[in-house]
Amino acid sequence: MKPTLSLSRTKEGKPYRLVLTCNYEDKDLAKGAGRGTARWHTKLKAWTYPPDPVVVRNLFDYFGEGMKLSPDLEDYLEQVCEWQQEVIQSTTKQDPVGKPLWPFQVRSVHFLEKTGRAVLGHQMGTGKTPISCVAMDYINASKVLIICPNSVKWSWVDHLDEWSDCSHIYMLESEASKPTDRRATLLQGKTEDREDRLAYTINNQEEFVIILNYDMLRIHQQVFMRHDYDLIIADEAHRLVNRRAQRTEVMEKLSKQSPYVWLLTGTPVRNNYDDLYMLLSMCDPVRFTSYWNFVSLHLESAPRPFGGVDIIGLREREGFNAMLSTYMYRVTKKEVMPDLPDKIYSTLRLEMTPKQSKVYEQMEKEFVLMVESMLEGEKKLEKVLTAPNVVSQMMRLRQICLAPAVLGSQAPSSKLLALQDIVEDLSGQAIVYSCFKQFLGFVEKILQEREIPYALITGDQSSMERNNAVEKLNSGDIQLILGTVQAMGEGLNLQVASTAIFADIDWVPAVNEQAEDRIHRGVIKESPTILRLYHPDTVESDILAVNKRKDRVIGETTGQVEVIREMLLRRR
């Protein structure tokens, strides 16, 4: 019997699965061609696979001209090919979109309009928010949800006011406050009150844009699920890559209730290529139904000694990128903004004060002895790292590098002494970053003593307070903003500042780059300075070495593992 590949569909007519009927002696061959995605269907007496053109290509590689395709499957593959060509062509269109955008931004609007459900993966600072606002009007969306980090909700109001014609903007806020900005109606108060106002707005308004953060999406998911929307935008969509997170589960369900779903992220791949699975699944839930099918078809993996797998790369880069181009459009600043000046990096090596060095050396010595002792029993650094005492000790080492006073010690901090000189010599506006909110309190005292006007942005503040801080910097009322990398690393436009000072850096290079790009954006004319402070022969130099070594994509956990390896090698 000649192998025959056909396509089965759901009751709604959507592609459901590929079905291969073949001779008994071809069963093992057919299973292997599926790269782990094949399932034997007892009733059909056939192998079934996800409806992915990659599977069809693999089966052809195995069976060649000896395999027959059903007419329905041939039509489906032709439609997929035509659709891919139309999406690619949309990124070349320059038809007017109603607002004066840069050429690459106009092409991006056409891409979002054509694909409907897509990832806009442009590098930070290329204007994904204005693009989305213009595209929203271009498709005539009346009922819109914008889900974003809390810190950028008012930034969205600013962009909507400038780039869109919408006049009914609502914002979900957790705390009741007196509205000072009349451009958005606040839906606030206790949970029950917010829920009633939210439901009333969705039920009774013909046009609305509702802005909310990811926590609000989780809290009020039942209200949102009862309605359909013209457009759903998820800003900083890399927050949705964890397929087990509740926010991701809610967004995955909600995304099926709109023909347009735009996922905005400057870092679509933060930890590894499997980060893309959830984003692609929201774009095309018919094709991307299983994480493990995605891994088997597209990624190279290796088993871990204690279970699970490590993703080590792509199976076929060219084919993967061709598939990805149907769902994601990404440009870099170098491609589309050749005149944008480069960042100037400066790394300031600081020696610890004698007392600070003594405190640090003692704690690091104890830490290394503890890790080496655990390694003798566990034999696996990744498993050792999960121990709470290892994580907390690493945190303390980093805090001592910043200022021993964070942990209650009276030892002076060389970083605080250096920052005193740096802020006094600043000729323009600047941002001071740290991963630790407690350290910023000590920096505040320095600024207050020198009467330098500043604002503070941390995760504890409301979106309105953060927006006010940004406005003060842009208007020139303050010279500095202090903030945590986590709270300020996404969505804020701080390009009026010419210097970003990192008192310490994150484990993950992509997180630091996000923060850097708050001041490296499309309108600047001079190169911004990125200044990093670090102590040699400490955990900070280990983190810096791992960040510089970008031969592999790392996340927080793998970043910590790499840093401990660096530390152990340095101590030997």
Image (spheres, rainbow, N blue to C red):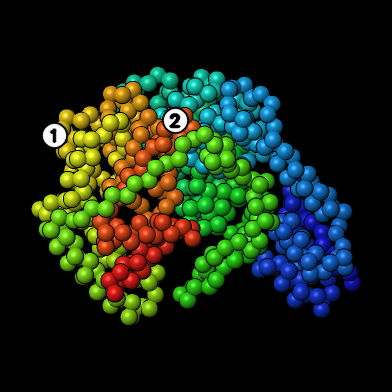
Marks 2 and 1, the one that precedes in the sequence: 1
Quarter assignment of residue 313: bottom right
Element type at mark 1: helix
Where is residue 476 shown, x and y percent of the image? 31, 24
Q: Nearer the viewer, residue 40 or 330?
A: 330
Vertical relation: 382 (above or below) 156: below
Quarter assignment of residue 191: top left
Residue 383 placement, left or right of 332: left
**Which quarter of the rendered picture does the C terminus lie within?**
bottom left
Question: Which residue: 32% across, 28% down?
Answer: 473
Residue 393 is tagged as none
The residue mark sitting in front, 2 or 1, is 2
Residue 261 placement, left or right of 342: right
**CB within 8 Å, label 2 to label 1:** no
Where is residue 287 shown, x and y percent of the image? 68, 53
Count of numbered marks: 2
Element type at mark 2: loop
Kindly give the residue lying farthest to the left in the view shown. Answer: 410
Q: Nearer the viewer, residue 252 or 96?
A: 96
Question: Which residue: 57% across, 48% down?
Answer: 279
Where is residue 565 shown, x and y percent of the image? 36, 69
Provide the residue designation for mark 2.
525
Q: Nearer the viewer, residue 136 or 443?
A: 443
- Asked if residue 221 can be seen in this view, the reply is no
Question: Which residue: 40% across, 69% down?
Answer: 382
**Which quarter of the rendered picture does the N terminus lie within?**
bottom right
- Asked if residue 118 can be seen in this view, the reply is yes
Q: Residues within 10 Å of mark 1 (few under 14, many from 20)?
A: few
Q: Residues within 10 Å of mark 2 (few under 14, many from 20)?
A: few
Tell me the amino acid under the disc marked 2. Answer: Lys
Provide the residue designation for mark 1.
449
